[in-house]
Image (cartoon, rainbow, N blue to C red):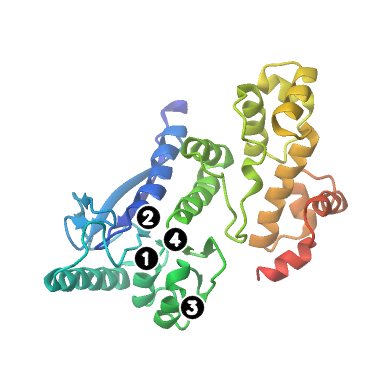
Amino acid sequence: MTGGARPRAIPVFMVVPPRALLLDIAGPMEVLRKANLEQDTLRYEVRYIGAATSVRSSVGLAIAGIEPLPTRLPDDALVVVSGATDQTMNAPGTPDSAVAEDAEGAAMIIAWLRHAIRPGIRLMTICSGALLAARAGLLDGYDCTTHYATIAELRRCAPQARVCDNRLYIEDRDRLSSAGITTGIDLMLALVAREAGHGVALAVARYLVVYLRRSGADPQLSPWLEGRNHIHPAIHRAQDAITADPARNWSVAKLADVAATSPRNLSRLFNQQTGLSVTDYVNRMRIALARELVAGSRLDMETIAERTGFASPRQLRRAWNRLHVIPPSALRTQFR
């Protein structure tokens, strides 16, 4: 750690409801665990909280060691609410007493959310966790989403919210929501990319063997790991460098230094392993970043071109038109 500086701590409170979907918890928290290991500028400090000290998860495994719901949260806290299942594995019939206990636990969490979430605290919901936030009145006036199977129920619970049913995840100010299950990983990767950098998010995604980011504004697979289905370490080093900073002026010579090979050999290997030239790959990563900025910000095209490494908006549009049917202006309108 440089100069003995301590990493910035980000307190994370993972809310574990009755019948919690285990992957809703494990996926996003594994992203944070690995992010802590990949850098030393910030540290996610995770605590697991709930209405009971233990719950039965969706797969029948008990989750224990859950802390009580805290009276007050730190000002910069991130609260993550897991989804839950109607029926856990190996439990074909649930006694009425257990159903009542689960309902009581959910009600306690809703009441706590209503009391604990205040301005400055970010609230992230995974899958049907959005229903708990909705019943606490915390999604009114926000864009949000949930698992496709609970979209209609979310609309009933939060009539003042703008519920979107074709999005992997949505970030609207201090409310973040994901469509469900594995999309919690996508949302947490997006958060890590913004707070710790693209390079860290890429390293985490590769460790988890998932896409770096499927954009929340796009239900299709992200291009961030395009051309990654190979095992050549030198080409992965070059791709890691490009993805971490697409806007940089990447020449073949610079990337050859990163990959520890000659420029000629890099060009040959790059085509062989990815099916793309170095220049094509750089432009695809720049357009991937530009697409996120177009869909998720109000920046003008000149600023986006500058931030993504293009010499001008005209150059950006030429590269864009090679990969996308609709122009940037139409994409922005679509996701507004």
**Quadrant in the picture for the C terminus:** bottom right
Amino acid type at circle 1 is Gly
Q: Label 4, on which residue? A: 180
Residue drawn at x 78%, y 62% as measured from the top left: 326
Q: Earlier in the sequence, mark 4 or mark 1?
A: 1
For marks 3 and 2 on the same chain, the one whose residue lies earlier in the sequence:
2
Q: Secondary structure at mark 3?
A: loop
Q: Is residue 44 left or right of residue 191?
A: left
Q: How many marks?
A: 4
| 3D distance between C-alphas at marks 4 and 1 | 9 Å
Measured Cα–Cα span from mark 1 to mark 3: 15 Å
Whether the residues at callouts 1 and 3 have beta carbons within 8 Å, the answer is: no
Q: Residues within 10 Å of mark 4 (few under 14, many from 20)?
A: many
Q: Which mark is residue 161?
A: 3
Does any portion of residue 39 appear in the rendered image? Answer: no
Image height of 10 relative to 140, above or below: above
- Compare marks 4 and 2 and give the one earlier in the sequence: 2
In the displayed structure image, the side of residue 239 where residue 249 appears, left or right: right
> Residue 169's mark?
none
Residue 208 rendering spot, x and y as whole percentages: 47, 39
Distance (Cα) linking label 4 and label 2: 8 Å
